[in-house]
Image (cartoon, rainbow, N blue to C red):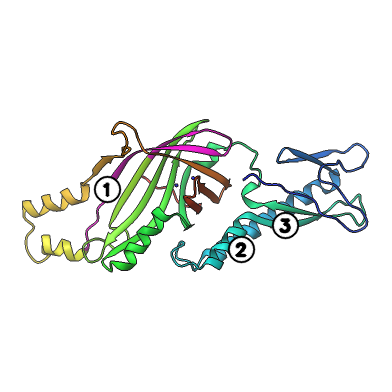
Amino acid sequence: MAFAVAPFFGAVPIKKVSYWTNFPIPTPTAVRKHHNKTFWRCSSSATSAATTINHELETKKYNLLTIIQDTERGLKTTANQRSSIEEAMVRFSFYFTCADFAQCYIELIVIVEGYEAGEPIELEKLDGTWRLQYTSAPDVLVLFEVATRLPFLQVGQIFQKFECSGQSKEGVVKNIIKWSIRNLLEENEGATLIVSAKFSLVSRRNIYLQFEEIELQDIRISEQLQALIAPALLPRTYLSLQILQFIRSFKAQVPVNSPVSSRQSVGGLYYLSYFDDNMLLGRAVGGGGVFIFTRAQPFVC
């Protein structure tokens, strides 16, 4: 799992302001850079403009989550819905007014995924657990599709956990899948599958993933199966207790190797198009699909 954008200023009433030209004001006191372009704004509107930007950004993030809420994490989407989601990820517009310029209204078209896209990734902010809300990645959607065809299989929550606190260029990412088998394991969270990878920064927004292993852990059997192994009305034998303990502590690890070379790990490029304190947008480079995550409670694994 992993835009170049071209914001511009449009024509405005009374006065046309060019994106590439500084506002003609005496001694500008505030500068905002976006995509290696610079424009000036008067100090009296700097705070209000920043507030407007943040408000509009939060509104568009909310709208994006609203659009995807009935898609079952991407499984049930039409072509029109996918187009709307892509558009919501990509573009929003907002207005702000410079008080020193009467009638000077500026419309700024911003690419959501390009918001501060020129800034390097802050690994300290990226560190933590993120819950999958939507994806168009085929390798994830196939899990949901299989679960719909096999009634006994359940796919629960999916997380992406970044471990990179205190790092500047590398870290570890774990793709965590909660799943279950109906009547044998606990509902939706009967077992945990973890796909671990090392990652390294290769550009300001791209990270290269080098997958290392797949691990199965945290098996929680259902009450029905526990009753079958160790009936509540009968004394629990040493053997039945050992079986229960073995199941609960069971872990299996399988290394992930390239089909070309058994010594080489499978890798992939992941583009972190946008993230802040509560939302993460990513794209698997090469047509692997988009991902929308929201911040979740820390996951211990």
Amino acid type, label 3: Ser
Q: Which span of residues is magenta-colored?
A: 197-222
- Nearest the viewer among 238 and 210 is 210
Residue at horizontal 8 percent and vertical 57 percent from the top: 236
At 28% from the left and 60% from the top, the residue drawn is: 180
Q: Earlier in the sequence, mark 1 or mark 3?
A: 3
Q: Earlier in the sequence, mark 2 or mark 1?
A: 2
Is 53 placed left or right of 259 in the picture?
Answer: right
Under circle 2, the secondary element is: helix
Which amino acid, by three-letter code, is at mark 1? Gln
Residue 63: mark in rendering: 2
Q: Quadrant of residue 142?
A: bottom left
Judged by its main secondary structure, the magenta piece is: strand
Identified by mark 2, the residue type is Asn
Element type at mark 1: strand
Whether 199 is among the magenta residues is: yes
Tag 3's secondary structure? Answer: strand
What's the mark number on residue 169? none
4 and 147: which is toward the camera: 4
